[in-house]
Image (cartoon, grey):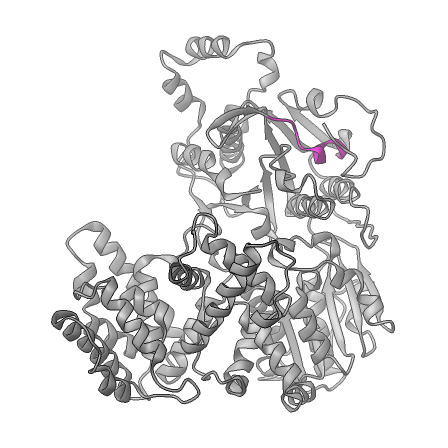
């Protein structure tokens, strides 16, 4: 096996003795390369059978990249890479649960509820309990139930330290919600981990089976593990062959339940572990790396690492002060047009410092004199147009703290004809017609799925109103024994006794008869073939193509879903449908990024981890935004904001632009702002300034070496 492309630390990690290993990998240090080489090394040199290896990641994108790299490394051993169990925690648990969940009374054809499904189910329960939905919104219960499940707390074990009456309301909603999922043969995202742990805890033979199968466990992004994932790893790695890669400095998902203590205390949990630091950065220039080191140094509690690089010094980091969010967006647009068109001298940004001492009226009059009669003319002329011939835009990325910050950017980009793609915006699978199709598919597999039933029982319209649906819902909830699978044909025989108004009764009978017809599609048919039967029976094309352009576009989206289904053509339709629905339910935000689209990427900092770009614009660097106002009174949350800023800085390969505004509209109000405290620690000699950034940020040098909590305005 050729290890010549690895540096000394990477080689040490790849060839480390069996046992527990913690690899502390700084950004851009080649952790994926190290992890895949370690798997290949175990197979080629240690002669470990691929089926005994379990590799866990946090995104489908990361798992796919690892699989591709492993296939290349093991090209001499056909099939070896495919026999490694590799995927996200949730996808791997879903596959195991398909085989083992019957011990809990569920059917192995369970459906997986996404966040939207979960909130709809909770909303129905809240209405049943006649709760004040303004005081106790479904989103609140959803977040608290997720927290409880991450802590492995079933309804009877619920203890989140809440005050009354929220404590009592949550206990009631959680209990009913879990019962509702059970009756529908459904799991939510967090159940995939919690119930997997519960099975292992309560059924030792099942745990022993998987301990024997997975004798070598490897984990990517270990700093992002939550208590449920931690418990899962502890149980599976009884053999102590646990190889984890992570970076405490990039632990940024505390709001989702991840626990930084898992990586900080790894050596206490595994005293015999070998710790290896990957500190050579292959991504960023020395200038960018030095700035990032200064920011992460604000955190008092961390595993010390000193990143270094053989890359060039690179360009200075641009620190820009703009008047407001509109000016911020214009600055970004001008720089992108300049860099993409190679005409930087024609679209150079005019620093605000040249207008110091001017009132808003002064600036308006100056703009009139320079650009014409109206402010709108001034606006449009300030914004350059991206020429038709330009360099690729894929290497431009805009990072912000929250999605709300994208509005001004989008407006200016539209004016400038700059194509852009928002990661984490409305995704393909969130479109109404796609969710309808997936709901029908879920009902074909599981007619008890009440969330899907409510969504499509009257879509297309059939004359089944809310009152009729509630009667149908109660009938299904009380119907039959959940421990025993009931064929749809048997259900329909009993369903004929339901008490509904004649028109609604007939429509409901026809609806379930249609479902039964679809389920009788020969087992050997593929998923695309089943879906063609389904759209005909539903009348989906006629319903969507109503003569409008919007209708045609919605039908085109359904046709695109057929394209997605093609990859499941070589398997029976039931298996293909399960895999498609599972894949969709477990998609993360970054999985929605279109790699082929030539567009500037806009995304939140939380979506950016693991990605890198030649040119990064980090905007909104103001107190209250970055760090976020919610974090200012809580040291742990403030520390996470530092790590979030560090992640943002280290996405950049060649050029880094840091931008803040002196004023910003927040909740409709025009407010003065202060530059982020994180900017104050940046090495001044590594920066070039626009506006009054040098005067505003570096007001004094009195602070000296301070922690992030001690820095204040």
Question: Which image quarter is the N terminus in?
Answer: bottom right
Residue 200 occupies which quadrant of the picture?
bottom right
Residue 168 occupies which quadrant of the picture?
bottom right
Measured as percent of width and height from the top left, residue 313 is found at 75, 40
Is residue 476 at least partly visible in the picture? Answer: yes
376 lies above or below 651: above
Residue at x 73% of width, y 65% of height:
245
11 lies above or below 569: above
Residue at x 73% of width, y 75% of height:
234
Extreme residue toward the right, this view: 272
**What stretch of residues is rendered in magenta?**
673-681
Measured as percent of width and height from the top left, residue 316 is found at 70, 33
Residue 459 placement, left or right of 653: left
Residue at x 80% of width, y 49% of height:
308
5 lies above or below 234: above
694 lies above or below 636: above
């Amino acid at each position: 096996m050729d290890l010549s492309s690895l540096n000394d630390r990477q080689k040490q990690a790849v060839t480390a003795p069996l046992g527990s290993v913690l690899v502390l990998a700084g950004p851009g240090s080649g952790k994926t390369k190290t992890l895949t080489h370690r798997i290949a090394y175990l197979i080629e040199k240690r002669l470990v059978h691929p089926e005994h290896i379990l590799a866990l990641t946090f995104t489908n994108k990361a798992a796919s990249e690892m699989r591709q790299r492993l296939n290349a490394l093991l090209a001499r051993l056909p099939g070896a890479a495919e026999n490694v169990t590799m995927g996200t925690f949730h996808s791997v648990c879903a596959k195991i649960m398909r085989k083992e969940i019957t011990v809990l009374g569920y059917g192995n054809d369970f459906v997986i509820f996404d966040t939207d499904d979960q909130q709809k189910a909770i909303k129905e329960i809240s209405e049943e309990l006649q709760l004040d939905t303004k005081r106790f919104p479904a989103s609140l219960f959803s977040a608290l139930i997720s927290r409880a499940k991450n802590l492995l707390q079933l309804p009877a074990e619920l203890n989140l330290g809440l005050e009354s009456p929220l404590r009592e309301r949550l206990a009631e909603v959680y209990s009913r919600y879990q019962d509702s999922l059970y009756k529908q043969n459904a799991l939510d995202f967090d159940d995939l981990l919690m119930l997997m742990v519960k099975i292992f805890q309560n059924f030792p033979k099942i745990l022993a089976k998987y301990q024997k199968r997975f004798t070598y466990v490897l984990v990517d992004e270990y700093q992002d593990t939550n208590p449920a994932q931690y418990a899962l790893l502890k149980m599976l790695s009884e053999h102590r062959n646990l190889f984890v890669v992570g970076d405490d400095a990039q632990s940024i998902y505390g709001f989702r339940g991840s626990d930084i203590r898992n990586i900080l205390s790894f050596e206490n949990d595994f005293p015999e572990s070998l710790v290896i630091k990957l500190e050579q950065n292959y991504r960023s220039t020395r200038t960018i790396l030095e700035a990032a080191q200064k920011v992460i140094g604000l955190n008092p509690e961390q595993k010390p690492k000193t990143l270094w690089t053989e890359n060039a010094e690179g360009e200075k980091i641009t620190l820009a002060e703009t008047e407001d969010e509109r000016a911020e967006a214009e600055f970004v647009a001008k720089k992108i047009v300049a860099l993409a068109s190679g005409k930087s001298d024609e679209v150079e940004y005019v620093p605000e410092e040249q207008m110091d001492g001017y009132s808003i009226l002064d600036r308006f009059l100056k703009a009139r004199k320079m650009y014409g009669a109206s402010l709108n003319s001034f606006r449009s002329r300030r914004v350059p147009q991206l020429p038709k011939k330009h360099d690729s835009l894929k290497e431009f990325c805009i990072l912000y703290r929250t999605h709300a910050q994208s509005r001004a950017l989008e407006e200016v980009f539209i004016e400038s004809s700059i194509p852009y793609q928002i990661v984490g915006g409305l995704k393909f699978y969130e479109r109404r017609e796609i969710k309808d199709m997936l709901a029908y598919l879920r009902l074909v597999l599981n007619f008890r799925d009440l969330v899907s039933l409510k969504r499509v029982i009257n879509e297309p319209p059939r004359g089944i109103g809310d009152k009729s649906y509630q009667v149908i819902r109660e009938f299904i909830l009380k119907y039959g024994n959940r421990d025993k699978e009931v064929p749809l044909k048997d259900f329909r025989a009993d369903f004929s006794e339901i008490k509904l108004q004649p028109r609604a009764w007939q429509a409901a009978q026809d609806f379930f008869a249609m479902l039964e017809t679809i389920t009788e599609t020969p087992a050997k048919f593929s998923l695309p073939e089943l879906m063609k039967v389904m759209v005909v029976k539903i009348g989906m094309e006629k319903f969507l193509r109503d003569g409008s352009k919007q209708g045609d576009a919605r039908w085109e989206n359904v046709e695109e879903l057929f394209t997605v289904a093609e990859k499941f053509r070589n398997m029976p339709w039931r298996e293909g449908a399960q895999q498609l629905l599972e894949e969709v339910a477990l998609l993360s935000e970054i999985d929605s990024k279109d790699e082929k689209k030539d567009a500037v990427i806009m995304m939140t900092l939380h979506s950016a981890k693991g990605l890198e770009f030649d040119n990064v614009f980090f905007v909104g660097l103001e107190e209250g935004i970055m760090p976020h106002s919610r974090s200012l009174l809580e040291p742990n949350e403030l520390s996470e904001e530092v790590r979030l800023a560090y992640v943002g800085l280290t996405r950049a390969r060649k050029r880094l632009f840091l931008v803040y505004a002196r004023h910003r509209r927040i909740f409709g109000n025009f407010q003065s702002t202060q530059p982020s405290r994180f900017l104050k620690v940046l090495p001044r000699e590594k920066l070039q300034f626009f506006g009054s950034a040098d005067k505003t940020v570096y007001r004094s040098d009195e602070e000296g070496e301070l922690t992030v909590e001690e820095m204040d305005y």
